[in-house]
Amino acid sequence: MQRTKVADLLRSKEIGKPFTVKGWVRTRRGNKHVNFVALNDGSGINNLQVVVDMEQFDEALVRRITTGAAISVDGELQESQGAGQNVELLAKSIEILGDSDPDKYPLQPKKHSLEFLREIAHLRFRTNTFGAITRVRHAMIFAVHEFFNKKGFYNIHTPIITASDAEGAGEMFQVTTLDIDNLPRTEEGEIDYSKDFFGKPTNLTVSGQLEGELAALAMSEIYTFGPTFRAENSNTTRHLSEFWMIEPEMAFYELTDNMDLAEEFLKYLIQYALDNCMDDLQFLSQRLQQEEKGKKDTEKSMELIEKLKFVLENDFIRLTYEEAINVLENSKPNKKGKFQYPVKGFGTDLQSEHERYLVEKHFKKPVILTDYPKEIKAFYMKLNDDNKTVRAMDVLFPQIGEIIGGSQREESYEKLTARMAEMNIPEEEMWWFLDTRRFGTVPHSGFGLGFERLMLFVTGMTNIRDVIPFPRAPKSAEF
């Protein structure tokens, strides 16, 4: 018989019909007359209860049905006698596909800490929490592509290996095939990159944006969805060295169009999660509430599903950076010295605590900030007429802070080259980028959404290393 997935069987109404299921054992309990096996195959948060009549099976076989073992069961679907499930499978035959030594299997039927599970990331998919996160992550990946496809955007694969630093940050992973124990040198004693694989220094990309702009200035509307890399030595719950970025770029879009698209995009993704992942979201919500049991009410997070609906039901507040600075400067936390980073007027680089104050305490709605000082933003952002701010926009969410960063791009060749000179970015290295401003330039905009930041928000998890299957961070490249 063909295998039926556990999630499909739990929804089935075909009582009395034969089915075959295959999966991994979560638990086995029972007595000398009957055993109950909780089976999961990753298709949903809920386990299927397999009923094993001990008179029908060899005791030695049943003893091998341990936590972590893989089994195949042929049986008959019947209405469940116990609470918690509508149907169960009465086993007719059982095959052990893979044994699991209960004394050595690290996932026992008990609550494990997230820190411990990070150490065994190769097995954490088998837990309820990480099964739920994996299914939600897949749903969000699918929804991203669906959203842009419906709007007529083209997906572009931008290079992972690049010779440019899109952000001007300089914190990049170098890519080389040179022998680091015997580096070729020029007469001046510098490393001779002409002998390297690409003939020049290359790095892992920090953003697909610049290449995305090239495509948008011919195809009108494109998006990238790929891995990006930052060699930033940040060991925090918000940073990864390898993460995934969604970066749409749109010709003929000004800043307002960019903000409208970002708001529509985020609401689409959240609605998709609510429509398609409710079982997993309810489980993750209960998990979060359990975790916060000892906290005071003022310290507790908003309930997960309520938080997602909160974003859907509210128009995002839009204000300038300067207006936000005025709010923050006059706020109680700033006046009483409660912010870790005091707000000291125009030019202050906003931190997560400031962003969250605006969203969670002051406006109590998602916020889009615009028109940042040019000194704290990248070279490619369009200069405003005041010559001191750029048409940047950041979308701020509760509990996350910045979830999207974007801008209208500078389309003027003269202004762009002047800005590059200010920031010591050599024109000769960016000739290909500047060509788009020489030949048929147009107003255009774009933004970047860190996919794992979105995942933190949608799942309610608090550590970014728990929403990507195999986290990469300083001193951490396991599995």
Image (cartoon, grey):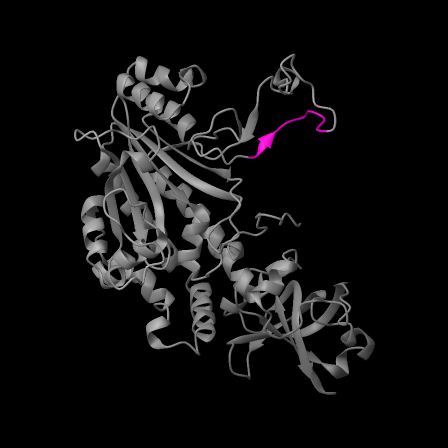
Decide whether residue 355 is among the magenta residues.
no
Question: Does 118 sit above or below residue 421?
Answer: below
Helix, strand or loop for the magenta stretch, by majority: loop
- Residue under the image location 73 percent in, 72 percent down: 66
Which quadrant of the figure has residue 71?
Answer: bottom right
Whether 150 is drawn above or below 472: the answer is: above
User: Residue at image x 67%, y 59%?
Assistant: 1
- Residue nearer the viewer, 119 or 201: 201
Position in image of residue 317 (x %, y %): 20, 51
The residues colored magenta run 173-180
Left-right relation of 215 to 79: left
Q: How many marks?
A: 0
Q: Residue at x 68, y 74 (%)?
A: 91
Depth check, front residue: 400 or 69: 400
| Camera-nearest residue between 460 and 195 | 195
Residue 126 is left or right of residue 396, and the answer is right
Q: Position of residue 233 (x, y in %)?
A: 53, 45
* Residue at the limit of the structure toward the bottom, as seen here: 32
Whether residue 339 is visible to the viewer of this picture, yes or no, is: yes
Q: Give the percent coordinates (x, y) of residue 50.
A: 64, 74
Q: Is residue 35 visible?
A: no
Q: Residue 2, image x and y in percent?
A: 64, 57
111 lies above or below 405 = below
Query: In the drawing, does residue 441 fall left or right of residue 169?
Result: left
Q: Nearer the viewer, residue 286 or 463?
A: 463
Say which quarter of the image contains residue 258: top left
